[in-house]
Amino acid sequence: MYLKVPVIASSVGGLMEVLRNKEDSLLVEPGNTKELAAAIRYLHDHEIERKQLAENAFEKVCRRFTVADMAREYVDMFLQDFSGLSQKEASKADWTCSRQGNGGKMSHR
């Protein structure tokens, strides 16, 4: 998206949270090779739409996925996981990652 290359993706999982069909990407059903081929042909044959999808995707990634925003989302996610801690306590906690006893999840002391 950041490279201004049009995106064709399967409509699965987390991709559906980021991509919008015919706005900033073309989404196809997983495993549907005919639909994938048609999407590739469409972008090849329609230069204006191809450039518009790529430009829309670029604008979205620049607007929505800044380093500051991503860092803030990670902090929010950690704080939700450790909701028993206040933000002040969380920032002072000694965070460790142990693969033993807790399934590889982060914990604090």
Image: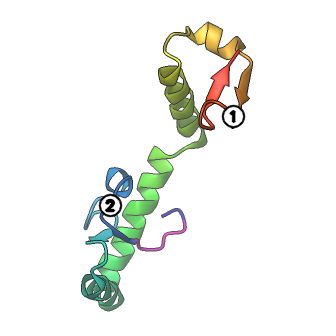
Give the residue number, with chain letter if any, for mark 1: 100
Label 1, label 2: how many angstroms apart (C-alpha)?
32 Å
Identified at 34% across, 58% down, the residue is 19
Spot occupied by residue 52 in the image (x, y as percentages of width and height) = 34, 71
Identified at 55% across, 39% down, the residue is 70
Residue 33's place in the image compared with 91, above or below, is below
Q: Quadrant of residue 31?
A: bottom left
| Amino acid type indicated by mark 2 | Val
Nearer to the camera, 55 or 75: 75
Spot occupied by residue 4 in the image (x, y as percentages of width and height) = 49, 69
Tell me where the magenta segment starts and ends, as one range.
3-7
Q: Quadrant of residue 33?
A: bottom left
Give the residue number, with chain letter if any, for mark 2: 12
Residue 53's place in the image compared with 80, above or below, is below
Say which element carries label 1. Answer: loop
Magenta span includes 6: yes
**Between discs 1 and 2, the one toward the N terminus:** 2
Magenta span includes 85: no
Q: Residues within 10 Å of mark 1 (few under 14, many from 20)?
A: few
SS assignment for the magenta stretch, majority: loop
Q: Quadrant of residue 107?
A: top right
